[in-house]
Image: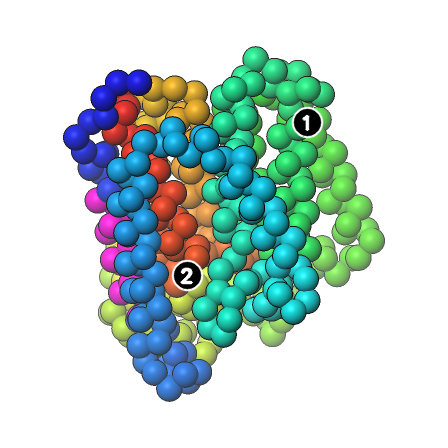
Amino acid sequence: MGKARSAPDATMLICTLMLLVIGVVMVYSASAVLAFHEFGDYYYYLKRQLLFAVLGVAAMIFTMNVDYLIWKKYAKIALIVCFILLAAVLIPGIGVIRGGARSWLGIGSFGVQPSEFMKIGMILYLSKLLSEQQNKITLFTKGLLPPLGLVASAFGLIMLQPDLGTGVVLVGAALLIIYTSGARLLHLSYLAMVGLAGFVGLIIAAPYRLKRITSFLDPWQDPLDTGYQIIQSLYAIGPGGLVGLGLGMSRQKYNYLPEPQTDFIFSIIAEELGFIGGTFVLILFMLLVWRGIRTAITAPDTFGSLLATGIVGMIAVQVVINIGVVIGMFPITGITLPLISAGGSSLTLMLTSLGILLNISRYSR
């Protein structure tokens, strides 16, 4: 490998830091009322966001300056640890239930989500595995099934929590790595049909699932239950208009819109900063993804290329699904907006992953 450049991709770094700053400001704006109502402290969520942002930036600086090839050595160990944590969180007394899902390990208000660690752990291991066995990936049994088996096992453990949103991001990023490594589209198509058949079977077994999934098509059919969140989100976006109501002037954050600081923070951005503010955030994400794709294409080796692909895929899938849910295009999945939404382990690990991506960019051809 050639000598690293003196600096990582500047556009990617600037976009990351700008999105992080916007996130800190908007988390405070969206959560101050809720924080005072729940904890008697307007700054509760702001202080948490600042803490994890600082930790995340420190981790990003570290991974940005560590040769990304070192993660190849520890990828297998990392994946094993992630599987152990995912299994441990399901044990009553160890896993903590929040928001109806047993997906946390921790004490009190501080905790970590093993599923967040699994996303980067799986990306690291698949990048290592498929870069070493790229000649086998076109073979269905020996090449494609082993990595898919790992992904399916992780997805199954995550769904036992249950946490559909994180599971979808994990599968999306993993499939992107597998496809990029040279898997045959025909094989993936067959597997997609098998998955669709299983999905239909789950709906037939419990018809209420179909109602929950399709409620986004017409949320006003059940405005007080399955359609409530989407309706409130649209009530936030609509009045925002071109320039918004003004920073801090949201009405929907007054206990109308659930989770305004996490899953639906983009609704508050659109309400307070309008079409212009929302578009600016989307442009920053598009620039970030574009530079990430460029890094994947110009990486000096297959491992770096697949690793960059997985990290970019993880970000892109989260952004597309989160925005899609907020504007009523997709059913609610519980996915946060990267770098913007309030988060602990999710924010820190996202910045850590971006540090790895920035390090790869230093070696780009």
**In the image, residue 25 lies in the stretch drawn in magenta:** yes
Residue sticking out furthest to the right: 205
Judged left or right of residue 54, residue 149 is: right
What is the x, y in percent for residue 281?
Answer: 30, 51
**Nearest to the observer: residue 258 or residue 327:** 258
Residue sticking out furthest to the top: 135
Q: Residue at x 76, y 45 (%)?
A: 200
Residue under label 1, please give it.
145
Residue segment shown in magenta = 14-28
Q: Amino acid at mark 1?
A: Leu
Residue under label 2, please give it.
344
Cα separation between marks 1 and 2: 34 Å
**Nearest to the observer: residue 348 or residue 263:** 348
In the figure, 175 relative to 154: above or below?
Answer: above
Q: Amino acid at mark 2?
A: Gly
In the figure, 331 relative to 250: above or below?
Answer: above
Q: Residue at x 53, y 31 (%)?
A: 126
What is the x, y in percent for residue 18?
Answer: 24, 51
Residue sticking out furthest to the left: 6
> Looking at the figure, which quarter contains the N terminus?
top left
In the figure, 13 relative to 181: above or below?
Answer: below
Check contact, mark 1 vs mark 2: CB within 8 A: no
Q: Residue at x 62, y 65 (%)?
A: 94
| Disc 2 packing (10 Å; few <14; some 14–19; many ≥20) | many
